[in-house]
């Protein structure tokens, strides 16, 4: 098989594809340009696309032999799904390897925000320490023990975060398209609530749901006004879940206490207001970004390709 990659990825993760022709950018260039990719796709049987590389349908129109897109990532907003469906191109993703790294990162962002770690680190490095004083009642953060974590989207990542919350002595409530089975709820002692109840009761709101047109701006001006003035917002899911301008306004007016974001509405652009606020923690879409996670994702891509080639269709992480 002729397998084309949009992006350089660790080659050790693709050892199982020996015997197939792998066409990958050099590590120093990082990614093929769209023109370079178009040229290589003309003879491609399989495309390995990464979640940060947008593939317009016109780019696929000349790829007459293309049978499979094995996407490197859980989300697939980078792909023209309807075009693939109409033209019989199967699409797979890598949902399992992203679970624990994303939950770890959400948890790290939460602790960083609650204990003001990045804010105080940043200010200590400024001339005259930006007025920071050491003292018993100085620079106080917020404890998480005994607080309520509201999880919007109780899938695998939401449940991995819930597991960490329970271990830290937090209460868990959640809103989801469907109730979890009772035995699952009992593991986390989690309670299903409406979205409005979750927003008004939670000390921390964590977004862990997939993006759909219905979930765009699920956190908007009205939602932010329902939250406690002491509440913290964590988003490691999709940037468009949050109306960033409404969030900036809520933070500036102290309608909520803080936000930690790994994803952005107009990524890679970040709203200027967020960059200026001390009660905000930002990271550059690195929720799955660990060495171990990347290698596991490569292996999942490999498994999807081999299962497709070997006609083990029931084993595919199939999107289309």
Image: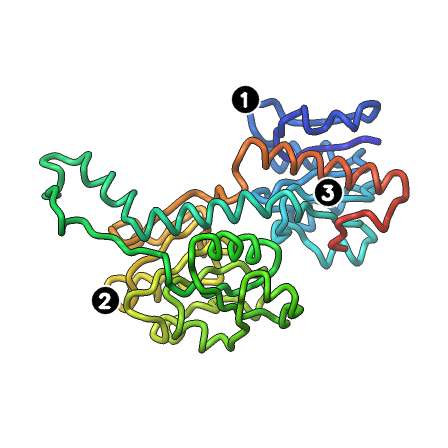
- On the image, the x and y values in percent for residue 85 come to 78, 57
Dot 2: what SS? loop
| Nearer-N-terminus badge (3/1) | 1
- On the image, the x and y values in percent for residue 219 come to 43, 68
- On the image, the x and y values in percent for residue 261 come to 41, 52
Nearer the observer, 59 or 138:
138
Dot 3: what SS? strand
| Nearer-N-terminus badge (2/3) | 3
Dot 1: what SS? loop
On screen, residue 187 above or below 193: above
Which of the numbered marks, if any, corresponds to residue 253? 2
Which of the numbered marks, if any, corresponds to residue 70? 3
On screen, residue 98 above or below 20: below
Left or right of 201: which side holds 213?
right
Q: Which residue corresponds to the image point at 82% horizontal and 26% vertical from the top-left?
A: 20
Between tags 3 and 1, which lies in front? 3
- On the image, the x and y values in percent for residue 172 come to 48, 65
Image quadrant containing the N terminus: top right
Q: Is residue 214 visible?
A: yes
């Amino acid at each position: 098989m002729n397998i084309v990659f949009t992006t350089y990825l660790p080659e050790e993760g693709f050892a199982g594809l020996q015997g197939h022709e792998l066409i990958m950018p050099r590590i120093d260039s990082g990614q093929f340009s769209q023109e370079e990719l178009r040229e290589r796709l003309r003879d491609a049987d399989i495309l390995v696309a990464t979640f940060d590389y947008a593939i317009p349908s016109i780019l696929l129109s000349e790829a007459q032999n293309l049978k499979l897109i094995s996407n490197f990532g859980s989300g697939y907003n980078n792909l023209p799904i309807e075009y693939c469906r109409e033209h019989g191109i199967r699409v797979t993703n890598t949902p399992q390897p992203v679970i624990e790294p994303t939950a770890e990162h959400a948890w790290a962002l939460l602790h960083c925000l609650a204990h003001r770690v990045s804010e105080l680190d940043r200010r200590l490095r400024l001339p005259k320490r930006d007025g920071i004083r050491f003292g018993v009642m100085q620079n106080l953060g917020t404890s998480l023990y005994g607080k309520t974590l509201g999880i919007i989207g109780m899938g695998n990542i939401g449940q991995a975060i819930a597991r960490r919350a329970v271990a830290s002595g937090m209460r868990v409530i959640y809103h989801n398209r469907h109730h979890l089975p009772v035995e699952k709820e009992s593991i986390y002692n989690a309670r299903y609530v409406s979205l409005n109840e979750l927003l008004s009761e939670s000390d921390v709101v964590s977004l862990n749901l997939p993006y759909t047109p219905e979930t765009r701006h699920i956190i908007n001006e009205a939602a932010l006004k329902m939250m406690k003035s002491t509440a913290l917002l964590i988003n490691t899911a999709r940037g468009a879940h949050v109306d960033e301008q409404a969030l900036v306004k809520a933070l500036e007016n102290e309608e909520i206490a803080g936000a930690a974001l790994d994803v952005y509405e107009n990524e890679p652009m970040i709203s200027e207001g967020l960059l200026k606020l001390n009660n905000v923690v930002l990271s550059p879409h690195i929720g799955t970004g660990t060495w171990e996670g990347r290698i596991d994702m490569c292996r999942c891509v490999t498994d999807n390709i081999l299962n497709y080639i070997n006609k083990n269709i029931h084993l595919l992480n199939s999107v289309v």
